[in-house]
Image: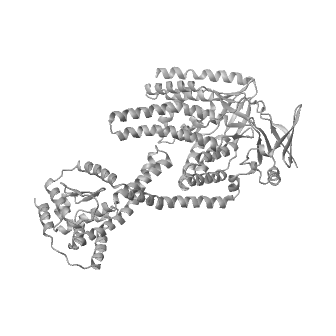
Amino acid sequence: MIFEGKYYNGQSSKGMPAQITLLADGLRIDYCADEVTGSVHWELAGMHPSEFNDATTLLRYGKFPQQSISVVDKGFKEALLQQYRGAAFLKSGYNSVLSLGFSGIAIMALSLLGLLVAFLIWGVPALADRVAMHFPESYERALGEQLYTKMLQGYQVNDKKTAALNAYLSELNTDLDYPITAAVVTSDEVNAFAIPGGYVVVYEGILDKMEHHEELAALMGHELAHIRNRHSLRAMTRSLSYYMLASVLFGDVSGVAAVLVDNASTLRNLEYSRTLELEADREGLELLRRNELNEQGAILLMERLQSGSELEMLAFVSTHPNTGDRIKVLNELIAETKRPAKEKPELERYWEQLKGE
Amino acid sequence: MACVIFLINFSPYFQTFMTTTLLEKEKQTTHFSFTGRGSEYFAIEIVNIVLTIVTLGLYYPWAKAKSLQYLYRKTELAGTPFVFHGTGKEMFIGFIKGLGVFLVLYAILIYGFISEDPGTLLIAYGVFLLGLLAILPLALHGMMRYRTSRTSWRGIHLGYRGELSDMYSTYLIGFFLTILTLGIYGSWFVVKLRKQMIDNVRFGNVRLRYVGDGGDLFLIHVKGYFLSVFTLGIYLFWYTKNLLHFYVNNIVVLQEDGTYSRLQCQVSGWDVLKLTVGNILIVIFTLGLGIPLTTTRTMSLIMNNTVMSGQFDADALVQTEEAYDSATYESMSDMMDIGVI
């Protein structure tokens, strides 16, 4: 079979009209330009892979400077494929994908998109959780200590109440591997939070609202559950991994993307912390049981929070689940195991100290 | 400002010189074109992404090589496509070396942070910045050498004859002058750098010249800035068009017999607006998966609206390059995303 094309000899950009013959062991190219005529033989092994050809087929041969031919004839491509089936210069994984057509490529693209979305929704949190759970305890404690000192800087610590709270906690059977460090800070805010590594900060505002020490025990149970299950550490690794992923994908400087993802991960964390809060509620109740305290303390605590300044409207988007829902769940749990509660004079004593002005 | 006006007055010199000689011979137009299709490039990039993910990123240099091979193959001058000869292996080696340099620099910076000592941090930061400053000219130089040597058209390779020391002096002097003049010199710096890069390109026996003037670029920036502010950003598209014209239209192609032609980009502000808005919509509605389509759209617009005007004899190019290899710098600049050409 003979095809018409142009031959470039690698020395000049002049395209010489040429006749290309497909032989069993390669191509023969007879060119003729002005007074120059000649013939070259291209062995199959010396031909370079030729991808992405269209109506024009471009073939290159040999070492630098490469010779090349260009043939504007669709039949040439087909003739090559027929004559040299399986030859190295015709192999191309990409060309075979290109020949899949529109639907094949669309399916590939959609499944890739699906995989990426699945990885973002399930893969990243699962990986982050694993990392957080395997985080060495000493590091966690060091990190917690830093956060704890930083947070306390903005507050005034009530030393007397802090001592009483720590005494109260040491009397309590907490079933926690970490040494617990708690502080009571002067603030009207009704709040308390747990910091990784066994640190707890309680606001005076919430203590003032309480009337029974079982409520305090319930609150401590809740906060210590956050610590035991590394809830904040897990939340932190999650948002950190989303942040890192974003900076890898969009390049470090792209502040917009970082902000976008930051917001997105906060929204996801809402869902995340709702389930975690319920988990902490449940484990907090465990603490009351273990210490044979009145489980109603947990309910009372919730009711105090509900009657307080917390706006029901805001509770919908807040990180804590709806208080009414929490009370419902707790009531169901308490109903399951009806047990008598014991008096705990030791705890009562520290509680008095905490409440005393 | 006196200094600025003084420099602007220089620019017509080149233009009058060019046009007077150009009038003597008949002008002819040689076309660039881009024949790539969004769907094809999309398919190639999908394969690239899958393989890059599966190999945890190791495939990236090969993916990059494939994309470039496709884009070059579909870019034509006078009806003949360009060929990109770079391979994944070459780029991989460059990628690893570049990565090594960056890891060392970042390790120094992180060490500074961990030490929690302000003095150490300051020194580490200084070393980091100096390191970046020292690498950039090397990366630019390497990228020019690599990209040009790996590009051919009708079998004729491009080449880069610039000296690394010249690149360093141009870069460092320009950098410090830009800082000293609080950024005003930046326009002249960019032009100097372009001259250094483009004037040293050989296309066989054809040479390139960059004849743009820093003053013109400065005016484009000033005008672009103020008009963009006044028009609430709408002028940005025309600003981009002006920059594109400044970068492309000031390239002169000189042939050995003394004839020459000029690149002419005919993209309008409207075109840039349509392209940009379209690209943004594509990226948003395909969740970023459509980025390859935006690349082919951009290439089509620019290439199909660019011509070489003057005397260009497509048959008269002669091979002048020798074989060359080292991919180190290509990927380094790629990592920093300097995007020169």
Front-lying residue, B85 or A99: B85
Q: Residue at x 41, y 60 (%)?
A: A268
Q: Quadrant of residue A39?
A: top right
Q: Is residue A220 above or below residue A24?
A: below
Q: Residue at x 63, y 52 (%)?
A: B42
Count numbered badges in the picture: 0
Residue sticking out furthest to the left: A357
Q: Is residue A29 above or below residue B183?
A: below
Left or right: B171, with B155 as reference point: left
User: Is residue B235 in view?
Assistant: no
**Colour scheme used in the picture?**
one colour
Q: Residue at x 52, y 20 (%)?
A: B6
Give how far across and how far down residue A344 sits, in percent. Answer: 15, 70
Q: Quadrant of residue A198?
A: bottom left
Q: Is residue A323 above or below residue A193?
A: below
Q: Is residue B318 above or below residue A327?
A: above
Give how far across and how far down residue A68 sits, in percent. Answer: 78, 40
Give how far across and how far down residue B298 sits, in percent. Answer: 61, 44
The C terminus of chain A, quarter of image: bottom left
User: Is residue B109 in view?
Assistant: yes
Q: Residue at x 61, y 33 (%)?
A: B144
Give how far across and how far down residue B31 sits, in percent. Answer: 72, 37
Left or right: B181, with A296 as reference point: right
